[in-house]
Amino acid sequence: MAAAAAALVTLACVCSLVLSVHGEAPYKFFDWNVSYGDINPLGVPQQGILINGQFPGPEIDCETNANLIINVHNSLPEPFLLSWNGIQQRKNSWQDGVSGTNCPIPPGQNYTYRMQAKDQIGSFFYYPSLAFHKAAGGFGAIRINSRPRVPVPFPPPADEYTVLIGDWYNATHKALQTTMDNGTQLPFPDAILINGKGPHGGANFTVQQGNTYRLRISNVGIQNTLNFMIQDHNVTLVEVEGTHTVQNTYTSLDVHVGQSLSVLVSADRLPRDYHIVVSTRFTNQTLNSTAVLHYAGSSFPAWGRPPVVNTSDVDFSLEQARSIRTNLTASGPRPNPQGSYHYGSINVTRTIRLANSAGQVDGKLRYGVNGVSYVDSDTPLKLADYYNLTGVFKMGGIADEPATTNGTGPNETNTGTELQNVTAVMDSDHRSFVEVVFENNEDTVQSWHLDGYSVFVVGMEKGVWSEQSRTTYNLVDAVARCTVQVYPRAWTAIFIALDNVGMWNLRSEDWTRRYLGQQFYLRVYTPTHSFRDELPIPDNALLCGQATNTSGLPFSLY
């Protein structure tokens, strides 16, 4: 009885702490065990990462402002972390779950994430952020539903389905990691998975004729853009990473690696089975995977060859991306319309130009941005900043613009092989409003993600960005999202309102490029250390590296 009472007191203290910080909001409790287990998505036995024995992992289904208490037990023989792609962690980068913010969960131990889906709706996913664990599983879907009193700009669907798509390898994640550690590019993937099942693995979605359904689609793969289509059916886009969109109808949609979106599909065809087709885009060879849209009560199988999409048509994809815009009259997580925030009339205080490149360091393949290839520290940067530890990272280690070439053109940038390994942090001011231009002078599609934020995608175009390019920006209804693509030999421009204090990872969602250095951290700075701007360090924070013996040290005043 005494032990039980103590446990209840402990739980009450935890709840009291969260309530005192976040106010009254619903709670969702999760207890997850992370382990290796046998999986067989491609007919070849593999060692996968399971959560509570599941591959993919359990779905998080909550609503706006829910407090999420997720206790993660690490039963792997190596350190482990989970991160939450698209969850903004308002004032709380302590819970972001990447190596720059959190110490790994040691083998045989646990860590409890305490976070809130503050002022968010939409479709997202979680994933393992250390080493190359993502290539073994450990990922799952996140749904944040609107609160009942906040209107949604479409009738309630008959049901909702999660669709996790991604490229996949027969090789183990450790073998893939060794390949990259040896300085070698990964081979082309072996297949595409749909909800953890292979090309003909039986992923089925049952519908009733006459009803409409919502599909929440996330590309949880390693490196490839994937196209999604349903045979003889159109889909209507309604949401992209927390933003209700103008409800355009498409025959197929490109989902770049790391991106999430929602579509509506009406079961308005003759009752039978129809192919759901997911295929690679912008690759020299094509992978296809199929699932089945099954009309209930029908025994007629899908007929004919699955439909195909032009794998190399960049113009089609670019025009589609430009057509995705914010629904200005729809309510987001709050009752006020999404268009009430007039981002186009705010003065930009800083322009940052970021150019990705491939190169070598010490004879091995590396990737970088503005000539810098990021290397991890054994001490999370957030802890080093908090405890004022020196020598952990280099503030200002990455420049605001790429180096220019020696005279071949005023706007050309250097994408040569000269890279420097740096634990790089870019500093920024709280409440500033910045323009970031991603410049891609390579022949592959890039996909970039910023933790802690949703950004306004104001422009994208082929060719070289210049100041004149701003005349083409969408300053009215640009979509706000957390993961943006940059087409080959092209640029993408975003606006960011830096209103979320913390240490935030800006990374390539191509996991090979991220692992080999195409990332850095953005510190959003405020000169005052106030709980109004940032939550306190968690009382259960794991300490490691130089922060191991820092319990008595004063925190940095930033």
Image (tube, rainbow, N blue to C red):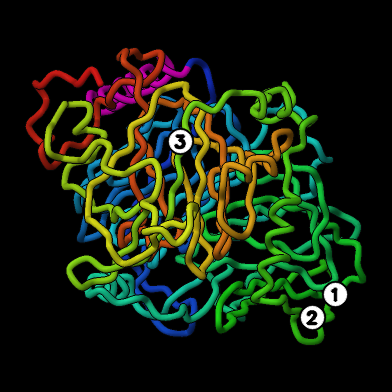
Determine contact: label 1, label 2, CB under 8 Å: yes
Residue position for label 1: 272
Question: As rendered, which of 350 and 190 lies closer to the eye?
Answer: 350
Residue shown at the point (52%, 16%) measured from the top left: 24
Whether 14 is among the magenta residues is yes
Image location of residue 226, percent across then percent down: 60, 67
Dot 1 or dot 2: first in sequence order is: 1
Image location of residue 279, percent across then percent down: 63, 74
Question: As rendered, which of 156 and 341 lies closer to the eye?
Answer: 341
Three-letter code, disc 3:
Gly
Determine contact: label 3, label 2, CB under 8 Å: no
Which quarter of the figure has residue 94? top left
Question: As rendered, which of 477 and 44 lies closer to the eye?
Answer: 477
Image quarter (top left, top right, bottom left or bottom right) of the C terminus: top left
Image quarter (top left, top right, bottom left or bottom right) of the N terminus: top left
Which quarter of the figure has residue 182? bottom left
For marks 3 and 2, give the CA distance.
43 Å
Residue position for label 3: 452
Q: Residues within 10 Å of mark 2 (few under 14, many from 20)?
A: some
Q: Label the magenta part by its dominant secondary structure.
A: helix
Dot 3 or dot 2: first in sequence order is: 2
Residue shown at the point (29%, 48%) measured from the top left: 73
Residue position for label 2: 302
Three-letter code, disc 2:
Ala
| Magenta residue span | 1-22
For marks 1 and 2, give the CA distance.
7 Å
Three-letter code, disc 1:
Arg
Discs 3/1, front: 3
Dot 3 or dot 1: first in sequence order is: 1
Relative placement, left or right, of 122 versus 220 is: right
